[in-house]
Structures are given as structure tokens and as C-alpha cells.
Image: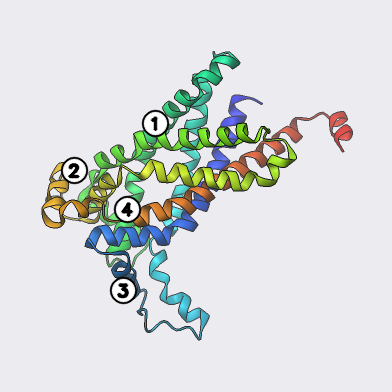
Amino acid sequence: MSAYTDTGCDFVAGCFGGACGVLIGHPFDTIKTWQQKLNATVGASFVHILNRPEGRGNLRSLNTGDPLKTLAQFKGFYRGMSFPLIANGGINSVIYSVYGSHLRTLESNLTDKEKLRDRNKNVFLAGMVAGFIQAYLVCPIELLKIRSQTRAFYGSTFSYAKHIFASEGLNGFYRGITPTLYRDVLPYGIYMATYDVFLDMVENCMDIHKRDSIFKSSYSGIIAVSGSIAGVLSWLFVVPFDVVKTKMQAETNPKIHPTMLATAVEVFKTGGARALIRGTKMILLRSMPVNAFTFLGYEHCLSACHYIVDQMNMKPSQLVANS
């Protein structure tokens, strides 16, 4: 299989995996955003979302008799999801393509023994490169998502993007880029390395190969657990950067929260150290299903893509022999 084909499969699988992650994680992300914006608890943020115009209800007034009305009351948890759903698929396509191609470049001139020896280091470095690219791709998208979640703007995402450009210029889309870089570059290296190490560890402990039928029967579970662990570990020490980023991006006045340091100091002065880790529980809770489904979508789509490409490249005689 050529490098171009590998990159193409990474692209398609990354898109599918990213979309899976957004569908699962957006309600958690909405709660986390309001926690950080209001410096509130999970419960208070939950009720606040229900009581906003798109929720039109509270915990006591939930309409359990009519499923459609009940569903409408929870609409606020999915506010701002349409753009991330589309964009994150595209972003993950680029990220996984960058990760895969950079990893293959690092390993291109290595022997099998050297690849095995340097695997963890190369996965970590490739992950950091992907994280750097990710920071610049997600910053504008997360800004639009956070503004959609926290601002009373009911037009389309495109209309709001035009509004931001008109009022804040191109730099307005990159408010919070510094904490985004701190949050994404090193942690993404940890993220990919943890996932890869855990998969290898399970495979070695079970003394099986991915192609073995025993491994296939439990492959999805192993992927899900590995993705969950990788997600939690990559988030453990970077929540303060996410809090600062959210504060900066939720604010439309550029004179308020102008820099990462000024915002961090202001958050600490008003809410103490606890305010800098506000949303940690929701972030970690969210990271488990999101990363489990992201990697499940990615791995299974990647396997399907490779299978289709292999079938297309087979000669007619090989297809007959395999049938």
C-alpha cells in the first residue's frame, strides 16, 4: 500500500472518528463551558442550560409525558453542535493524516528492530506535531462554539463568523491561541503515546495478534478502554489552560482578558485556585466516552478502508482464490 493510500485512509478514518466523538461529547462540553464561564457546579450549569430560552424548562418542569417535548427541553445541550460536527470531522481528518504521515516519515529509514525500540518516542513526537496543527485549526472553531453556547445569538454559525470578523477582525478568531497551544501540543503527544502503549501492552499480555480471531472478538472493547485512558491522562494537567482559553474566547471585548497570564491572574483573584480547575470532573467524564468512540470510529473505519483498497488492488485470480 502506497504512502498516499495510507494518508487517504487516515484522512477518511479521522473524519469518521471525529464525528463520532462530537456526537457523544457535545452535551458534556456544553456543561463544561458554562461551568468555566460562570464558575459554577455541574448541577448549577445543568439547570442554567435547561432554563435558557432553548431549554424552556427546569428539573421540576421536565415534560416526561411527551417524549418530543422532553427532547426539546434538552436542546440547549446541543446548542452550537452543527458547526463542530462538520468541522471536527475535517479537522480530525487532517490531524490523523499529519500524525500518520509524520510517524511513517520518522520510521521510514529504520529497521524493524529500531522501529520497535523507538516506537514510543516516535509516536509521542508525531502526536505533538499533530497537536500543534490541531491548535491552529480548532481555535477558531472552539471560539465559535463557545460563543454559540454562551451568547444569545440565534443566527447561523456563518452569520456569527461574519459578525466576529466585522467587529474583531481575523485576530478575533484566534483569541485564546496561546492557552490552546499549551493545552494541545504536549498533551496530544501523551494522548497518542498512551493509546499506542496500552494497545501494545494488552496485545503482548494476551500473546495474540490483531488478526487473530480471539483478539477480534474483544478488539472493540480494548480500543474503547485504551482511548478512554489516553483521553483522561492527556487532560489531567492541562485543565487550567482550558479554563483560561474558555474565559478569553467567551469574552467579546478584546480589552477584557487580553492575554493568557492576565486572564489566569483574574480567574485566580476572583475564584481562587479552584476556579482554575473548574470543569475538571466534566472534562474527565466527557473524555472517556468521547475518546472511546473517536478511536472506535477511527480504527474500524481505517480497517474497512484498508480492506477496500486491498480488494481493489487484487488481481482477478486472487479474488477468485479468496472467494
142 to 8, vertically: above or below: below
Label 2 sits on what residue type? Met
Q: Give the labeled residue for mark 2.
A: 260
Which quarter shows the N terminus?
top right
Q: Residues within 10 Å of mark 1 (few under 14, many from 20)?
A: many
Label 3 sits on what residue type? Arg
Q: Are marks 4 and 3 in contact (CB under 8 Å)?
A: no
Which quarter shows the C terminus?
top right
Of residues 323 and 295, the one nearer the viewer is: 295
Q: Secondary structure at mark 1?
A: helix
**Which callout, 4 or 2, points to the residue nearer the camera?**
4
Q: Secondary structure at mark 2?
A: helix
Q: Earlier in the sequence, mark 2 or mark 3?
A: 3
Q: Give the labeled residue for mark 1.
A: 128
Of residues 134 and 270, the one nearer the viewer is: 270
**Which callout, 1 or 3, points to the residue nearer the camera?**
1
Q: Secondary structure at mark 4?
A: helix
Q: Which mark is residue 52?
A: 3
Label 4 sits on what residue type? Thr
The answer, for residue 118, to whether it is visible in the render is yes
Label 1 sits on what residue type? Met
Of residues 58 and 4, the one nearer the viewer is: 58
x and y, in percent, of residue 179 in the image: 26, 41
**Spatial separation of the CA atoms under disc 4 and disc 2:** 19 Å
Q: Which mark is residue 280?
A: 4
Q: Are marks 1 and 4 in contact (CB under 8 Å)?
A: no
**Spatial separation of the CA atoms under disc 2 and disc 3:** 29 Å
**Spatial separation of the CA atoms under disc 1 and disc 4:** 22 Å
**Residue plotted at (31% across, 76% down):** 51
**Spatial separation of the CA atoms under disc 1 and disc 3:** 39 Å
**Residue plotted at (39% across, 31% down):** 128
